[in-house]
Image (tube, rainbow, N blue to C red):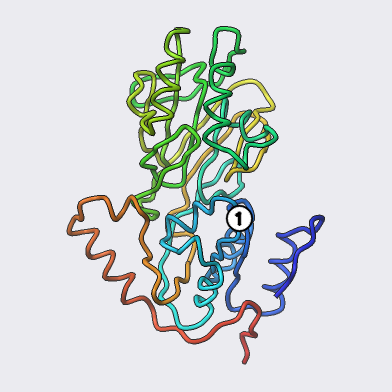
Amino acid sequence: MVLLQRQDDLRLHAEAAVSRGADALGMAGGDGSQGLVAAVSAEHGLPFVCVPAGTRNHFALDIGIDRDDPVRALDAFGPARETTVDLGEVNGEVFVNNVSLGVYASIVATPGYRQAKPRTVAEMLPDLLGPDAPPTELAVDSPGGPIVGAQVIQVSNNPYTLSSLTGFGSRPRMNEGVLGVATLSITRPIDVNRLVALEMAGHPERFEGWRQWAAQELEVTGPSPVPAAADGEARSWSTPLHFAIRPAALRVRIGRGQSGASPAFQWTPLKVSTLLGLGRIVRGRPSGMVTVESRRDT
């Protein structure tokens, strides 16, 4: 076990654990940290244990881990079931949840955002989307044709059932092998008030400038650099941005007694293929005790 300091390079610590013969990697932290260690796990084919110790823990939510009990999540280092989930990728970097461009990237960089997310979003939207707001100049191809100047572009590791512009939702599945794409375009000042009302009600998808679709690959073009929020962390990339999905890239261990299913999955009517998938998860693969740095030759 490694207790991290603020200046530490998390990826280097994870790689060092692999070099010492770890049988599994685990991360106690928020979604940004989860993504970094999950990427190392996927590269080396090692199972990953998610310990939710961040602010929102969306990844833990959607793989069916109790976000309110991080200590219980450690049970996955013992007898546990294993499943595989997809990973998202942008310009070669992994994300476990989503990458948002445009308005949300500005909101994430705001002091106080993490302490009052919904309120901060509602307060900032009128200024960020109003007639005096600068255009994003971002462009993306959709099934209905090019979308240029969208105020929000969100690309997620599997599609969300969204309840907010900031991605406060859930994914029914984490293994569909597709990216979820959502864009928001506002063309009239009068639309801002309607959008804010729908956002507060938890139904931004009802706004007429909202588009959603699924894709295995996506390219976003526009001026560089592009401010972004990746798994809730402020980032910046040079364009073009190339998004891709890595199907079944990550082995995830889930401790006994955890649901192993997201809220959106539990709300969705079950199909035969879904039931078969659940059966595989419940059966899991036989596994014994592991620790974060146990030796392969012991």
Give the secondary structure at mark 1: loop
Residue furthest bottom in the image: 298
Which residue is at 60% across, 69% downward? 26
The tally of labels here is 1
Asked if residue 282 lies left or right of residue 296, the reply is left
Residue neighbourhood size for the residue with mark 1, other residues' Cα within 10 Å, grouped as few (<14), some (14–19), many (≥20): some
Please provide percent x and percent y for residue 274: 24, 59
Decide: is 139 above or below 58: above
Q: Quadrant of residue 208?
A: top left
Question: Closest to the observer: 221 or 121?
Answer: 121
Residue 109: percent from the left, percent from the top?
67, 34
Q: At 43% from the left edge and 60% from the top edge, which residue is drawn? A: 63
Instruction: Name the spot of residue 117 as percent of width and height, x first.
Output: 56, 37
Q: Is residue 179 left or right of residue 235?
A: left
Considering every residue shown, the one lying at the far right of the view is 7
User: Is 289 in front, or is 137?
Assistant: 289
Q: Does 189 sit above or below residue 178?
A: above
Q: Quadrant of residue 11?
A: bottom right
Residue 12 x %, y %? 75, 62
Mark 1 — residue? 54
Quadrant where the image shows the C terminus: bottom right
- Figure quadrant of the N terminus: bottom right
Please tell me which residue lies in front, 45 or 200: 200
Q: Amino acid at mark 1?
A: Gly
Residue at (47% x, 52% y) in the render: 246
Q: Nearer the viewer, residue 209 or 239?
A: 209
